[in-house]
Amino acid sequence: MIDLDKLTIKTAHEHLMKGDFSAVDLVKTYLAEIEKKNPELNAYLEVYDDVLEQAKVADERISKGENHPLLGIPLAIKDNILVAGKKATSASKILEGFVAPYDSTVISKLKKQGAVFLGRTNMDEFALGSSTENSAYGVTKNPHDTSRVPGGTSGGSAAAVASDMTLGAIGSDTGGSLRLPAAFCGVVGMKPTYGGVSRYGLMAAVSSFDVIGSLGKTVEDAQILFEAIKGRDVLDSTSIDSDSLSKKQLIIGVPWDLINQEGIDLKVKENFKKVVKNLEKLGYKIKDIKLPNCLALYYIINFAEVSSNLARFDGVKYGLHIDGKNLLEDYVLTRGQGFGKEVRRRILLGTYVLSAGYYDAYYGKAQKARTALKKEFTEMFKEIDLVLTPTSPIPAWKIGEKSDPLSVYLADVFTVTANIVGLPAISIPSGFMELEGLPAQAGKKLPLGIQFMAPHSGEDLLFEVGKKFLNEVL
Ligand code: GLN
């Protein structure tokens, strides 16, 4: 019997190498767990039919003496990352039945290292949302409380890690999509520096924000996955090799003004204050810093790039096609019925902010603000080494509770900034909050998370502080 609860990528690797169990044994255990839990949680949209064959190949490689940290390790893949020959839909009806014609760079790297792909996971359609409620294939449920959302947009991936339906997962982050679900599900979510991981084979949402990253139960696991997928790639001209930063005494900046503003849950604040005290006890210096609320800036650029990126889905080349009387009607019918409500909202708003007459007032201004923000960060990182905030201003909400899109956007207040300026960030579990009130909630606990942001290519700093915090405080 393999005890999945305790298992991490690191320990599973040691067991595989020692021959305590085989990769086939391991994936069989995961497949059984998926069969048991996925019908309720809906974290996987599809479990691949060749999982056992993949594991057999890994076992052969192990028996020949190969040794990679991910050899034989089962992983879940977000539905917007291409795996050759497998379906990929970005959880959209418009891509129903679409089969990936090639491997994304991330997948080729993982294949070379012998990882085993269990299946593709649920997400908000085209990675637009914060709760996985915008999937065309039903919401994923939070394993800690199935009446609540798992966060988004990589909600399927985070829920799968949290419920032991995989050891680790790969997802994407445009404005918090790895970090928010990590916080809501009590796991670690890591967003690399912009370009730190190749985007080749990732379905584009906001090309100037998008980055692929990892989810795991521990900081070590998120790091192992990042190390396996990182680096410059000739197929993505924005990709880079990361350097490694290290420092003796880290100074952590905390934007108290932003954290003390209205709309931040009191228990989130309480938990965060405890975290800050504990970090001080560990010897970190804490400094008050100023950070603006970047939501308006983020969403204007998001809408603009989404409207442009999603123009390619016209029913001619990919996925769904609905016949009209002429070509224009084909487009209108296919896009009208293929895209969900949030996607259509963003296409409309994005087209508006890019239109002649409004371009300068919205998009142009947002780009100028983005440049100014980057400069502010460069200055700020002369005085501090890391920025610390809660990951989310509120804990996981009830499924269906938020009907107004603006109130959902507000959940991203702490995460979007890292994407605007392209910096690496990590979400780490920081404990639980008890639910009170309704009798049905009594005794239930929801995970909370904190976020560290580092300077460009500062992933190592995030791993260092993250490990220290999880090992010594939590
Ligand atoms: N919640 C943000 C949005 O809806 C971020 C999503 C993401 O990171 N893909 O745009």
Image (tube, rainbow, N blue to C red):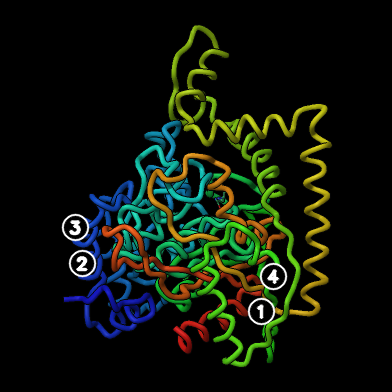
Which image quarter holds the N terminus? bottom left
The answer to which of marks 2 and 1 sits earlier in the sequence is 2
Q: Residue at x 37, y 34 (%)?
A: 97
According to the image, label 3 marks what residue?
Answer: 36
- Label 2 and label 4: CA atoms lie apart by 44 Å
| Looking at the image, residue 367 lies above or below residue 113 | above
CA distance for labels 2 and 1: 37 Å
Q: Nearer the viewer, residue 38 or 433?
A: 433
Precedes in sequence: disc 3 or disc 1: 3
**Given the image, on which type of amino acid does mark 2 rest?**
Thr
Q: Distance between the residues labelled 3 and 2?
A: 11 Å
Q: Which amino acid does label 1 sit on?
A: Ser
Label 4: few (<14), some or many (≥20) within 10 Å? some
Tell me the number on the disc at residue 29: 2
The residues bearing labels 1 and 4 have C-alpha atoms spaced at a distance of 26 Å
Asked whether, in this view, residue 366 is left or right of residue 234, the answer is: right
Mark 3 against mark 1, which lies toward the viewer? 3
Query: Which element is circle 3 on?
Result: helix
Q: In which quarter of the image is residue 289?
A: bottom right
Farthest residue, direction left: 1
Mark 3 or mark 2: which comes first in sequence? Answer: 2
